[in-house]
Amino acid sequence: MAASEEEYNALTCVQLRAICKERGLVQKGVKKVIVDRLMKDDKASTPAAAPTPPQAVHSSPQKEDNEEEDIGIILGSPTKVLSSSSPVETPVKSPAPAASASSSIDNNDQEFQDETHTCHLFEGRSKYLSSSGLHFIANHQYRPSEYTHLDNLLNPFWTYLTECLPLWLAPNMVTTLGGMHCALAYGVMWYYCPDFDTTPPDWVVMLAGYCAFAYYTLDCMDGKQARRTGSSSPLGQLFDHGFDCICTLFFVATFSSYLEIGGTHWYNMLQTSLQFAFFMAQWEEYHTLVLPHNAGKWCGVTEVNYASALGAICVSLIDREAFFQKSMEDTLAPLGLTGGVVKDMELRHFLLCGWGGMSLILMGLSLKRTLCHPRIAGEDMDASEIRFNRINALSKLASPFLLCVAAFIVPPEFIRTRYLSVVLGCALSLLTKKMIVFSMAKMPYAIIQTDVFPFIFAAIWIRYDTRLTKEGGDFVLGALSIWYA
């Protein structure tokens, strides 16, 4: 029996292309094109040459198309695809009605092991993607948390903008355009404010605000474009979230530039809190299978990103140095308040304390959701199993936490803040991207990631080697930036 269009659409691009390969059909094109090609072949086929049931799809880690071959490339050299001596296939069952195509493929997941609860101290061979991991990545389904009121309000706007895009425009190109906005603003900010200790021109801050708005809007459009063109794929999620990892550096640079906190530990606090919170969101998805992007119906990623963009545009119109560097006593005087214990604190430092407090609350909520999730502490689990799952989950935060601690070891007045920012940002982004991949692959994420050691050793060296000059410290961080990139 031929499969219907709905049943074909329920399959992934990898599975559809495998069917095309068995039938001798052209495998290239977006998902909609491949489905149309299969439907046309079904109509032209005779009963004697019935189409191969979709449930007999081969799932090999070595594909002729580039969709799975690119999985190792997205992470760079630290993560590679572990090839096997022979392709791994899902068992070919006896012919059955095609109506059970999608359900039979889902049942094949039982033949592969979910290893997210496995505890590995060091990476070893676990840093390579296994055949089981490739299977889970190929069949991964993105599951976001609930949307905020602003998400629902702006969704028609994002949909309208997406429908204005040409159908030939790839979703990954939409993601790239958003990332290029961040790169543009980051480069201009670097030129005018290289170490976040001088105020940039007003138009540069306004440009950063516009780029932040454009970046997040395009980030909300790429998934819609993928569904619109029928080209959704796990690789698209890797590409999208990989860009999000590195674009956090742009937001840190924007805030730091108009607050002028370069050369201080305030800068370290801002960057580590933002990137560690981003890592914890991926860590939560690793354990719960749901990616959080909000804290209730009124506050989420959309609100934070658009507020950042609007804030940058607004502060570009004022004297930022006079506004942010005045004391809390002077700030609160028009309201008839004295400021109390924070009266001598500058406004910028008070705002950063508020940001740090908000970050701690968000991290605490993430911890609570994860450690109390049924996959970690289910009702059918005994106390010892729950305790092991919780300790195992918490241990996967060790490597990024060590990176954040190492950032505070480096004397901020001894090195250029920009170099520290880039190397720390690249290192944390690398760990986060690996967490994203292993979350999709349902493979064990090692407690100790070897990628943290170069930065930790460099931080200790810069801190305690009295013979090392300032130029030497900058050279060490610059070399590490190239290595992590």
Image (tube, rainbow, N blue to C red):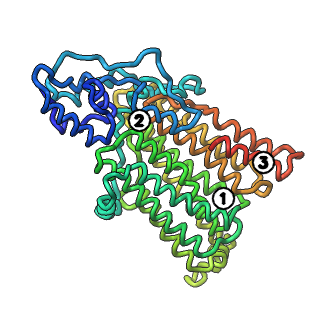
Pointers 3 and 1 in contact (C-beta within 8 Å) = no
* Residue drawn at 35 percent across, 24 percent down: 59
Of tags 2 and 3, the one toward the viewer is 2
| Residue 396 pos. (x, y %) | 54, 35
Q: Which residue is mark 1?
A: 267
Q: Nearer the viewer, residue 18 or 55?
A: 18
Disc 3 from disc 1: Cα separation: 20 Å
* Residue that appears at 33% across and 37% down: 28
Label 2 is placed on what type of residue?
Glu
Badge 1 marks a residue whose secondary structure is: helix
Q: Residues within 10 Å of mark 2 (few under 14, many from 20)?
A: some
Query: If the image is split into quadrants, where does the C terminus sit?
Result: top right
Q: Quadrant of residue 197?
A: bottom right
Which numbered marker is on residue 470? none
- Whole-percent x, y for residue 52 in the image: 21, 23
- Vertical relation: 241 (above or below) 199: above
Kind of residue at disc 3: Phe
Asked whether the viewer can see residue 261, the reply is: no
Q: CA distance from mark 2 to mark 3?
A: 38 Å
287 lies above or below 152: above
Q: Label 3: state its secondary structure.
A: helix
| Closer-to-camera residue (14/412) | 14
Residue at 27% in and 26% down: 24
Query: Where residue 67 is drawn, which disc sits there?
Result: 2
Counting residues from the N terminus, which is met first, the one under dot 1 or under dot 2?
Answer: 2
Which residue bears the numbered disc 3? 475
Mark with earlier residue (2, 3)? 2
Which amino acid type is shown beneath numbered disc 1? Answer: Tyr
